[in-house]
Amino acid sequence: METFIRKSLKMKAHFVIEIVQTEEGWVARVERLGNRRLTCSQCRLEVKRTRGRLRQRSWKDLSLRDEPFWITYRPFRVQCPRCGLRVEKVSWAKRWARVTQALAQAVALMAKKLSCKEVAEYFRLDWKVVATIVKRVVADGLKKRKLKPLHILGVDEVSRKKGHQYLTLVYDLERGRLLWVGQDRKQETLDSFFAWLGKRRTQTVQTICLDMWAPYFASVQTHAPQATLVFDRFHVVQHLNQALDEVRRAEVRKLAGQEKVDLKKTRFILLKNPWNLTPKEHGRLSHLLKLNLPIVRAYYLKEEFQRFWDYRQEARAQAHLKQCLWWATHSRLEPIIKFAKLVKDHLPGLLAWTKLRISNGSLEGMNNKIKLVSHRSFGFRNSDHFISAIYHCCADLPLIA
Ligand SMILES: [Zn+2]
């Protein structure tokens, strides 16, 4: 048993004296093996000279058949010729860790699938210990990650706490990988992404897909002026749907009686693509269209606008948009006019779609995963934990060796 523990924890200069049963579970008491050289925790040099010891420390290890298992040891102070007086590095745990590397690895692996709370319960740890392990693993993984040259980036945002808190996510769209997560969705947020990426690696970026969101736009123009912008299809449609919904709500407020009843709960019918409607919904839609309300005009405009995505020739797409925009600006519907203005201001980035056919849509799976992580880490007050959880679950970082 002692030998097994010694080997599995990769001890070279240490050995297990005995394993005893205590109230807290099984404890393996570890000692230095003879006069073996110890490792300097600063520079990893093997050092012979020691100077006293620290108090006894214990590290939690993987449970043994459901019984908690601990390692106890009194680390030496070593006199390193390079660094001076340092504490020795033990083979079974990271520097300030309270758990062994083996346990940390198991925790990290499970935290990819479960919430911190669930992992903590399973391993009988404090959830803060789990969160710290995840944070460290992520920091290590980010250091060890090797980035391939980046050509196509996608910028997206995720909201938390009912839209009171935002995170900005940057993806490598070519490889469908999460690259970076940052707090908020300001210009400075994306600025700090480019600062992290560095000038040299920013230069290889050819295309960036993003929302028509002015702060992002400004940051990209400053840091990656060479990149072609493509406005994300999903976000454009979202803006349009919001406009449509505003028109509908304004109308519900105005109407009375039967017409009001007709218009209520039509939101999803109006926002859905016609080919996705059930026969019953189809019936309600045609009834609605017969009423010839402003919402109907807005609806037809939405349908017309959506044809834009099929065009492959820029000139034709532009002609189509021009027509849509003319109708929109003359629709006398405030939200629709606002949308038209938004499109007008971002025309080149929209037309880029016809040639590049790039959107963040390919990341939908990733988005769902992030929503799941967000849901799981709901208890986290501070978004640091949330950010490391996103990295941990979605960024494909190398896990500690
Ligand atoms: Zn040293």
Image: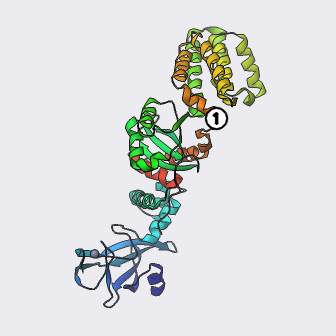
Q: Position of residue 221 (x, y in %)?
A: 44, 35
Q: How many marks on residues? A: 1
Query: Quadrant of residue 216 in the image?
Result: top left
Q: Would residue 275 be visible to someone looking at this image?
A: yes
Label 1 sits on a secondary structure element that is helix
Does 397 sit above or below residue 91? above
Q: Would residue 377 be visible to someone looking at this image?
A: no
Neighbours of disc 1 within 10 Å: few (<14), some (14-19), many (20+): few
Q: Amino acid at mark 1?
A: Lys
Viewer-closest of 62 and 305: 305
Return the residue found at the far bottom.
Answer: 34
Q: Position of residue 14 (x, y in %)?
A: 37, 84
Viewer-closest of 18 and 104: 104
Image point 67% across, 10% down: which residue?
258
Viewer-closest of 396 and 371: 396
Return the residue found at the far right.
Answer: 279
Viewer-closest of 69 and 300: 300
Does 195 sit above or below residue 84? above
Q: Position of residue 172 (x, y in %)?
A: 54, 48
Q: Position of residue 256 (x, y in %)?
A: 61, 8
Does 242 sit above or below residue 153? above
Query: Quadrant of residue 347 in the image?
Result: top right
The colour scheme used to paint the residues is rainbow
Where's ligand 1: which quadrant?
bottom left
On screen, residue 180 versus residue 333, left or right, reads left
Residue for badge 1: 355
